[in-house]
Amino acid sequence: MTDAHATHFDPALDLELRREAAVPPRLVWRAWTEPELLMQWFTPAPWRTTACELDVRPGGKFRTVMEGPAGEKHDNAGCVLAVEPERFLLFTDALGPGFRPLGSGFMTASVTIEPTATGTLYVARAYHKDAAGKEQHEQMGFHQGWGAAWEQLVGLVGRL
């Protein structure tokens, strides 16, 4: 990650998932930035991502709709903050497209994709405004959910 896209990780406020897999970084990037691919892995089963709108540029839209097995539905809209193609993506639910404030927001997230000798080092971070937000996200199953989604992503890109 370049210094231009560095974000400060504070373990008191933020969560991190770090994984490595024998998959090419360019395919991990595609899975994050092509709606038809993101919809196949983004939500841990048995939940599904049923809609996705991505405009992968600063100020662009990052929207997903997640549906649960009992009919629960979560429409999550946000804004892309920073992009370094095939390496870094930063987005938030505190802003809408065009950096318009939404009046609410749970987190800002970053995804860093780094090539390794055998594939990809993947670091996903969720940044929260306070410790209560971090704790809530942790109790919602951040590590299990984001970890399961990563495994689904690896399975998907292994078939591309």
Image: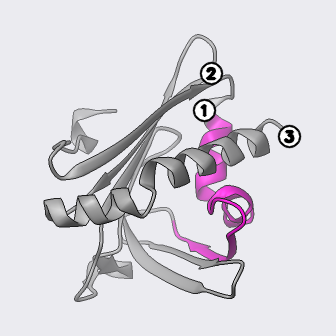
Q: Residue at x 80, y 35 (%)?
A: 158
Q: Residue at x 30, y 66 (%)?
A: 136
For mark 1, what is the residue?
25
The x and y percentages for residue 68 are 66, 78
Measure how far apart labels 2 and 1 are at the Cα level: 7 Å
Measure how far apart labels 3 and 2 are at the Cα level: 15 Å
Q: Are marks 2 and 1 in contact (CB under 8 Å)?
A: yes
Is disc 1 placed on a helix, strand or loop?
helix
> Given this view, does label 1 or label 3 mark the residue nearer the observer?
3
Q: Residues within 10 Å of mark 3 (few under 14, many from 20)?
A: few
Quarter occupied by residue 52: bottom right
Instruction: Please name the amino acid that badge 3 sits on.
Output: Arg
Q: Are marks 3 and 2 in contact (CB under 8 Å)?
A: no
For mark 2, what is the residue?
119
Instruction: Please name the amino acid that badge 1 sits on.
Output: Pro
Taking depth in this image into account, of 115 and 108 the one nearest to the observer is: 108
The x and y percentages for residue 109 are 36, 56
Q: Residue at x 66, y 50 (%)?
A: 31
Residue 99 numbered tag:
none
The x and y percentages for residue 8 are 17, 43
Dot placed on the residue nearer the N-terminal end, 2 or 1: 1
Taking depth in this image into account, of 148 and 139 the one nearest to the observer is: 139
Instruction: Please name the amino acid that badge 2 sits on.
Output: Gly
Q: Is residue 120 visible?
A: yes
Picture layout, residue 25 above or below residue 141: above
**Dividing the image into 4 quarters, which one contains the C terminus?**
top right
Dot placed on the residue nearer the N-terminal end, 3 or 2: 2
For mark 3, what is the residue?
159
Report the span colored magenta. Answer: 26-55
Q: Is residue 37 left or right of residue 73?
A: right
Picture layout, residue 119 above or below residue 53: above
Is disc 2 placed on a helix, strand or loop?
loop
